[in-house]
Image: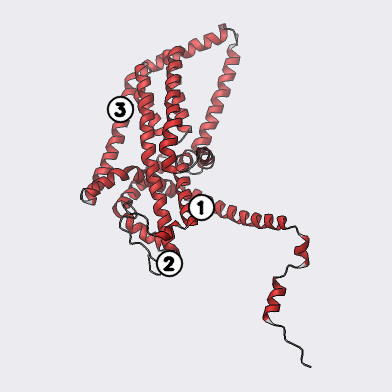
Amino acid sequence: MTPEKPRLRDLLRVAAAPNEADQTVPNGLRVAAAYAWRFLVLAAAIGVLIWLVIQLKLIVVPLMVALLVTALLWPVFEAMLRTRMPRWLAIVIAVVGTLAIVAGLLWLVVWQIVREWSEVRDRTLKALDDFQAYLIDGPLHLSSAEIEGYLQQALQFIQEQAELLWSGALAIGTTAGHVLTGAVLAVFILLCILADGAGIWRWALRLFPRTARPGVDAAAHNGWRTVVNYARTQLLVATIDAIGIGLSAFFLGVPLAIPVAVLVFLGSFIPIVGAVVTGALAVFLALVYNGPWIALWMLVAVLIVQQVEGHLLQPLLMGAAVKVHPLAVVLVVAGGAMIAGIPGALFAVPLAAFVNVFAVTISSGSWRTGAPPGGDLIWSTVPRARKGTAG
């Protein structure tokens, strides 16, 4: 009698049945191991990506700066395009106007520093002498050697922290040549994005598989719109902070009110950290130049401005624009500063906002319901990719 051939269904059942070794491993351990090796692969991929970014820092940092400046300029640029203004003229007005504003602010800063520097220096030296005399003759009764030792420790600590902050993995460079090269490259990238952002995005979209292009297009569109909202909102928050603290310093008679306001404006683009550092600088100037009572009022003014920002502007404006929880903002800013110094802290929030919106759009499948609304710079002239068609 001819033996019956095993059927394919029986072979598949035997192959799919768990073997004896699998039965001895708890199910929870198998699940944990599956998560673990996937996590290791993901961590390795992120590590390789960070390593590549570090190696290409002289390109990555100007690119990020150009994208952030583009997001800042986009509301004005879009308004000019809607008036049927030629694109080249809108680019010239936007770029030249931005450079003029920056040059004007720098001129005001230099003008006030040059005007008040000698008086501030003399008052600072006198304040330091008075403070040293207080430490010696006051209740602490410190000796000159002890004061010198404490000052050396404080200066060493400040120097170490400054070096750690400035020597981040993504710092533009330590030489003037690196800074100049990065600035020129950032301006060139900015002009290219404003001139042909749609063409650049069409080329980038073709790098993805054809079936994935509609989802990537919609997710990137939503992410870019979030970055534009972040830049616009952060510009408003930084302006309010600068006006509040700058006017407070001016009315209290604190020197260098304009440089303080400009530093507050620039520092506010680094959430949490920037406002604290620049506010502390204003209080320190008031303490050295005007004495403890004016410094106390300056501290009150800084705290009021920061409380308005933290409890009113950030939750109402930034929360709706970025769609990232405040705790996540703190963590990504800290992580960005640890990895990449000042550039990491500056780009952490917009990058996290973009990744968050991109991932949510892809995972939710909302892009399948239809093409996202147009109007953004990079996507304004991109033909929407449909299923079965090229992007």
In the image, residue 109 sits, relative to residue 72, either above or below, namely above
Left or right of 29, for residue 136: left
Q: Which residue is mark 2?
A: 210
In the image, residue 17 sits, relative to residue 166, either above or below, namely below
Q: Residue furthest bottom?
A: 1
Residue name at image x 56 percent, y 6 percent:
137
Is residue 129 or residue 29 the one in the foreground?
29
* Residues tagged 3 and 2 counted as in contact (Cβ below 8 A): no
- Residue 51 in the image: x percent, y percent? 53, 51
Q: Which residue is mark 3?
A: 108
> In what quadrant of the picture does the C terminus appear?
bottom left
- How far apart are labels 2 and 1 at the CA level? 26 Å
Is residue 145 or residue 55 the one in the foreground?
55
- How far apart are labels 3 and 2 at the CA level? 53 Å
Q: Amino acid at mark 1?
A: Leu
Q: Amino acid at mark 2?
A: Arg
Q: Is residue 200 visible?
A: yes
Residue name at image x 42 percent, y 19 percent:
298
Under circle 2, the secondary element is helix
Q: Earlier in the sequence, mark 2 or mark 1?
A: 1
Q: Earlier in the sequence, mark 3 or mark 2?
A: 3
> In what quadrant of the picture does the N terminus appear?
bottom right
Q: Determine crowd level at label 2: few under 14, some 14-19, many 20+ residues with C-alpha closer than 10 A.
A: some
Q: Determine crowd level at label 3: few under 14, some 14-19, many 20+ residues with C-alpha closer than 10 A.
A: some
Q: Which residue is mark 1?
A: 52
Q: Determine crowd level at label 1: few under 14, some 14-19, many 20+ residues with C-alpha closer than 10 A.
A: few
Q: Which mark is residue 193?
A: none
- How far apart are labels 1 and 3 at the CA level? 40 Å
In the image, residue 116 sits, relative to residue 343, either above or below, namely above
- Residue 259 in the image: x percent, y percent? 36, 26
